[in-house]
Amino acid sequence: MSKPRQSDLRERHQTASRVLMIRPGSFGRNDAAAGTNAFMQSVSGARGDIAARARAEFDGLAQALTDAGVEVLVDDEPELPDSVFPNNWMSFHQPESGPAVVVTYPMATPLRRKERRSSVLNMISKAAGGSLRSIALERHEAEGHALEGTGSLVLDRVAGVAFVCRSPRASGRALDAWSDATGFETVRFDACDPSGVPVYHTNVLMSIGTGFAVFVPETVADPVTRAGLLSRLDRLGKAVITLSVVQMGEMCANMLELRSASGQPIVAMSTRALDALDRAQRDAIERFGGIVHAPIPTIEAVGGGSVRCMIAELGDAAL
């Protein structure tokens, strides 16, 4: 595998019609990850019961996406608590020219580093027709630098712009390396929850679709930075749908626009997130795609992530 040139990763489409999901086996609380993820909660029950509930929730979401016309590739989780969130350790790109590219990322905690598996990369390569370039950034872990994939990075794949809030899971050095390798512009900012804790992943406060973006402006304390982010989204041609910090806590921003095999846009989110949106916000989102949702309360509470975190986009199944 060879390294692509700068700017090779800008894509023709913002959204994917094929995705990878990892079915949880030993799903549970990762105490090391909880130190920087304020969304994780304690849940009663034996670990085996919690894992069983997570598997049922996973199956419901995977089926809902399949029913909506999205091609869902499923792999089984090894003995790791957070493998249900594959978008943190890899991202897939179909540049306008040249072969597909997979990027692997430096993870903040040792257990999560074990999620990078050759079997999954081989599955992705097969789905891409066997032609796949690689950018491997995990070497930065040795120096204590992390960048957790499309958890840390919210991408405008067509424009080649990445939004990222600084946190222990998104270091400047790893981000510089990613930007140098991909040619993406990076828009960096600070964001905190109401307690003043840095938001651990950008994708819990922002999502970018083909024609819209959801954003939680209250998380950005500096008014100049906040205005700059809204202006940048506007210049990218996105209709911005603003959410409150309370709605962020309900995982409302952790949504993802996808496409069916026939090209119909859909917006995937959890039932919890959907229920927390008001009517005007729902209507605004539905102008850009039909909402597909499923209840995943155990995964959200124990893992501290939601639907977007469970999905790694694998581009256009037709290509």
Image: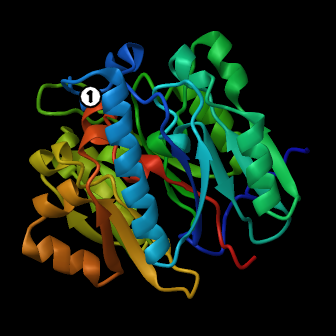
Query: Residue 91 at what x, y percent from top left?
Result: 62, 48
Secondary structure found at label 1: loop
Left or right: residue 154 compared with residue 191: right
Query: Residue 69 at what x, y percent from top left?
Result: 51, 78
- For the point 29% across and 30% down, which residue is it? 302
Here the colouring is: rainbow
The residue identified by callout 1 is 40
Identify the image quadrant of the C terminus. bottom right
Residue 200 appears anywhere in the view: no
In the figure, residue 257 lies in which quadrant? bottom left
Query: Residue 81 at what x, y percent from top left?
Result: 46, 26
- For the point 64% across and 43% down, which residue is it? 179
- For the point 59% across and 36% down, which residue is it? 89
Number of numbered tags placed on the structure image: 1
178 w.r.t. 233: above or below: above
Left or right: residue 188 compared with residue 241: right
Q: Which residue occupies the foreground of this view, 190 or 46? A: 46
In the figure, residue 31 lies in which quadrant? top left
Left or right: residue 154 compared with residue 243: right
Query: Residue 306 at what x, y percent from top left?
Result: 33, 47
Identify the image quadrant of the N terminus. top right
Q: Which residue occupies the foreground of this view, 287 or 260? A: 260
The amino acid type of the residue labelled 1 equals Met
72 w.r.t. 38: above or below: below
- For the point 39% across and 19% down, which residue is it? 30
Q: Which residue occupies the foreground of this view, 306 or 158? A: 306
Residue 204 appears anywhere in the view: yes
